[in-house]
Image (cartoon, grey):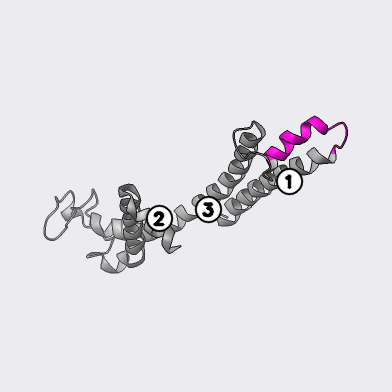
Amino acid sequence: MADLLRRLVRTPQGAIGLGLVVLVLVLALVGPFLAPHAPDALSPLRRYRPPGPDYWLGTDQLGRDILSRLLAGAREMLPNVVAPVIVEASIRVAFAVMLFATLSFLGLGAQPPASEWGLMVSEARRFMHLSPWMILWPCLAIALVAIGFNLLGDGLRDALNPRT
């Protein structure tokens, strides 16, 4: 893990991306405590105030402090973002399995004598008439993994849906 982190921060995009994500996570955790004003406090007399010493980022159409609303909104936004990311990751795994199997089947992925499922299907297709199980089991393995991750993604989507 430490090696991965070192390689990540070696590139500018990795270092900046990691820094921004950590900043947002910290603000999501402590932001509501740092807010200078109540995020939902209406103040019609302070509408459309420009940024200044009292309201660092100004006020909105209802006189609410924009900085306070951003800090409070980061905490509420985080749970809504985590669920779709987890679901998307599980579905991407299924796609990756299918992609690698396809590339290996076409001869663009793993090469013999590797035990890669797509390559096993490619090699076994010449012998289907002699021993159909040579192609059956790798095809079944690819299908089960892809279906499994897709169903997991669907289940996670339902389980993590804040509306259910």
Of 114 and 16, which appears nearest the observer? 114
Q: In the rendering, at what x and y percent does residue 162 appear?
A: 52, 56
Task: Looking at the image, tell me whether mark 1 or mark 2 is earlier in sequence order.
Answer: 2
* SS under mark 2: helix
Task: Looking at the image, tell me whether mark 1 or mark 3 is earlier in sequence order.
Answer: 3
Of 93 and 121, which appears nearest the observer? 121
The residue carrying mark 3 is 86
The label nearer to you, 1 versus 2, is 1
Q: Which residues are magenta?
A: 118-132
Residue 141 badge: 1
Give the total of numbered labels: 3
Residue 30 vs 151, above or below: the answer is below
Q: In the rendering, at what x and y percent does residue 159 appear?
A: 60, 56
Q: In the rendering, at what x and y percent does residue 84 appear?
A: 51, 50
The residue carrying mark 2 is 77
Looking at the figure, which quarter contains the C terminus?
Answer: bottom right
